[in-house]
Structure formats: C-alpha cells, structure tokens
Amino acid sequence: MKRNISKFLIKNINLKYFSNFPYLNSNLIEKNRLSRKSVLIYKDILKDKQHMQEALKNKSGIYMWINNTNKKIYIGSSIDLRNRITSYLKNSVLIRDSSMPICTALLKYGYSEFTLEVLEFCDKDKVIERENYYFELFQPEYNIVKVAGQPPRIDYTPEIKKKISDSLKEFFANVENREIRSLSKQGYEFIVIDILDDTVTQYHAIKAAARKLNIDRRIITKALKSETEMIISDRYIFKSLGEMENLGNKVQASSKTISVLDLETNIKTTYKSITSAANALNVYPQSLNTYLKNKSDKPFKNRYILNLE
C-alpha cells in the first residue's frame, strides 16, 4: 500500500514539475517539430563523426537528439558544439552522467536509433536564450532542466511535504539515531529519504552514499547544497544534518570567488573559493590554479568555463 502511495505521489510531482512550460497542445507541438528547418542533420552519427566534427568546429548553437523509436527528443546548447556533441560519443561520459535521461536513452537504444540535428548556429551570448525558445516550442521529453541555465525546481505538494516531515520524525524518534547524531563531529551527516521504499538512511560521507545508491557524488553535493529540495533519480531526497560549508574547505580571508559554467548543462555556479570549486568538480585545487594562471582559451576538462570574480 505504501509503495503504491509513493508511486502516486511521484507521478503527481512529475506532472507538476513537467508542466513548467507555457501551454501548448500536443498537435501544435507535433506540427512545430515536423516543420523545423535544421541546419545540419546526422542520421548515422558514428559514420558521420568526422564530417560532424569539421562542420561544428568553432561553432556555438542549439542541437537536438531525436529517438527514432519513441520520437522523444532532447534539446541542448553549447558555446562549443564540436566538443559537446563529441562528448556524447564516449560511453564513459554516458555512464558517468547516467542520471540524465538522454544519456540513459543513448546507452539503452544505441546511437543507431537516434538522429542528431543542429537546429541553428548562434552567437555565444545567445545560446541560453535560443535554447529556451526551443524548449517552449518543442517541450523536449528527455530534458530534466526545463529552463535553460537554471537547476530543476520542484514545488512539493502538501502530501509529499507531510511525507518528508513524517519520515524525519520517525527517524529521530529512534534513540540510537539521536545518539549517533550527537556523537558525530564531522559535520557531513545527512539522511536520504527513499520515497519508493519509505525508508530513511543516515550517511556520514557523500562518497559512501554515492557508491551505495549509484549516484554521482557531485549530484549528491548539489542536492545537499541546493536551496530547494530535489528528487534525485525520481526516488531520493537528500537532507543535511550538519553545516553544509563543511562539504568544502572553510573559506579563508584570501579566498577568491570563482564562477563555473558547465557547458554540458549550461548551469553557472559560483563558489566561495577555488578549493570548494575543485571539490565540486572532483579535481585538485592546484589543477584549477594552474588552468587559471595559464589563461587557456579552451574549456577546463573540455567542459567548464572558469572565471574569477
């Protein structure tokens, strides 16, 4: 009974979450998709890889993956289309980012079942604006983020809010849990609410939770630091029990604020120090310092644009 209630709540949450677009009826959406005039179309992406890389060199713009089996689509943008599209052709990247529906779909169906289209080329400072235009026009099913450049937001229903509250009350009603909480000094403690199994589990390390739940630890870190609660993998809610500043080194007086633009998601994040940014990107701080010192024109790790603020 509880599992059925959980699935009902998740369905309602997703329906509310995916309704952020301006209203468009299904017939109009389909008409828009059929009438599009893409500048490039690749129906055999592996065979056309070399031509694609040459055509996209030094180009920025909007692209779309189309699943030929179920007709679902994914829309993305990048200031470096060649690098961004090439990253999709690496299984290691798809596995690493398997929390993204498009990556899971590419792994499941294979490249032969997808068509890649470049909808348009545009100036670098226009990619977010144009991506949002196509979001509203096509309502892509594979996109988690519904507003380009912003993290996903969920407006919880009263039912799910009560569910979270009841789970926390039940967890802390256990004397042993309260003792573990009081004895811990790391400040990394957090709990994971599984809304499918109606369970609450406490963790003392992000790495342990990432390994157990098979979720990238950077995603868990973002979920814990997010101002709005997020449901990860349509199942897990992460809630901190300690000071989240301890997820990265404490900021020193001489720390420099750094902004990081993720070219794969078009999400820009500002960190209070290079060390905290390095922790989020899972790299050594010295790597960021060296990159910034050399003032390279290429994205860091072929994915991130870094700027000191």
Image (cartoon, rainbow, N blue to C red):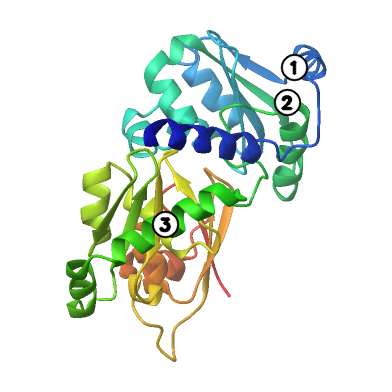
The answer for how far apart the CA atoms under marks 2 and 1 are is 6 Å
* Front-most of residues 177 and 237: 177
What residue is at 36 percent from the left and 29 percent from the top?
90
The Cα atoms of the two marked residues, 3 and 1, are separated by 44 Å
Q: Say if mark 2 contacts mark 1, CB within 8 Å.
A: yes
Against 227, residue 134 (above or below) is above
| One can see residue 115 in this view | yes
Nearer to us in this view, 108 or 234: 234
Element class at badge 2: helix
Residue 234: image location, x then y, percent: 45, 38
* Label 3 with label 1: CB-CB less than 8 Å: no
Q: Which mark is residue 138?
A: 2
**Residue tagged 3:** 166
Q: Which residue is mark 1?
A: 33
Q: Amino acid at mark 1?
A: Arg
Residue at 36% over, 51% down:
193
How far apart are labels 2 and 3 at the CA level? 39 Å
